[in-house]
Image (cartoon, rainbow, N blue to C red):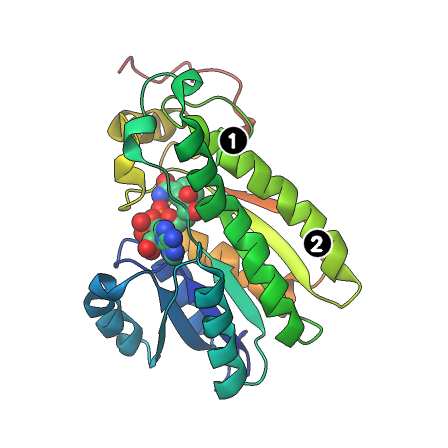
Amino acid sequence: SAGLMAGKRGLIMGLANDKSIAWGIAQACAEQGATLAFSYQGEQLKKRVEPLAASIGATEMIECDVTDESSLDALFAHLEKIWGAVDFVVHAIGFSDKSELRGRYVETSRQNFLMSMDVSVYSFTAVCQRACRMMPPGGSLLTLTYYGAEKVMPHYNVMGLCKAALEASVKYIAEDLGKDGIRVNAISAGPIKTLAASGIGDFRYIMKWNELNSPLRRNVTQEEVGKAALFLLSDLGSGTTGENLHVDAGYHVVGMKAVDAPDI
Ligand code: NAD
């Protein structure tokens, strides 16, 4: 088929439901002719994600818990078997115990700190490590991050540290894989109501604040993240690596509350 992604085969990790950022990206890629495989966490998600994937013509569904090395090995062994190569991977995965996504960061436990870093940070390195072995020049790896890595945001707490480490790993991996013609980037998305986001304290307030104070005076959608991902995953982004592309209605450039924003 024609399209920006024609002839490209990609793995989408982190689809939970039709609100997932992974879904916005998958739809954009499929529309542009990509062939997709999906990985999902645990059997109970399978029933929900299988019909979604099928609706855009994807049949390859592979279970993968990113904290499990053998599960990751099995995922990439399967891709090797069916495709032999992979052109792009989208990592849209993060997790922290929601009891620590409220109140003071300083109270974070060692156990949740390490678990959050494992799921939300190391997993991207573990994925890149395996994907790059079967990725031809022109390959593209993408992860999702948030402004809470750069500035203190209420309740984001340990996830802010995770995203800061994730953003740093994007730069290091970009350097490692650049010589092979593989690009590595992040999208820093503005707040979007998803399953993961609902674990963050006062999330509705955060969305309202962004809507009232971002330059575009609104929030962004999964579709808009999908369009930006298309740039980074396709040949349009061939000159861009190690980048953190903000898709946040411009919120990250703002220094103070908008003069026209009402008190909320
Ligand atoms: P989501 O809940 O739809 O997706 C999170 C996914 O992570 C789920 O599919 C879940 O199954 C998966 N996951 C968690 N632990 C896993 C594990 N051990 N193994 C495999 N998969 C696992 O929510 P989302 O908002 O679409 O999140 C996708 C990414 O976008 C996350 O990295 C998140 O931090 C990031 N992000 C979200 C927002 C937002 O406001 N929603 C903003 C910026 C960045």
Determine the image quadrant of residue 169. Answer: top right
Q: Position of residue 92 (x, y in %)?
A: 43, 54
Amino acid type at circle 1 is: Leu
Q: Position of residue 200 (x, y in %)?
A: 30, 32
Q: Which mark is residue 161?
A: 1
Secondary structure beneath label 2: helix
The numbered mark, 2 or 1, whose residue comes first in the sequence reads: 1
Query: Front-most of 50 and 97?
Result: 97
Say whether residue 82 is left or right of residue 174. left
Between the C-alphas of marks 2 and 1, the distance is: 20 Å
Residue at coordinates 48% horizontally, 45% vertically from top-left? Answer: 118
Determine the image quadrant of residue 159. Answer: top left
Say whether residue 249 is left or right of residue 19. right
Say whether residue 174 is left or right of residue 189. right
Q: Which mark is residue 174?
A: 2
Amino acid type at circle 2 is: Ala
Query: Front-most of 221 and 199?
Result: 199
Query: Front-most of 169 and 23?
Result: 169
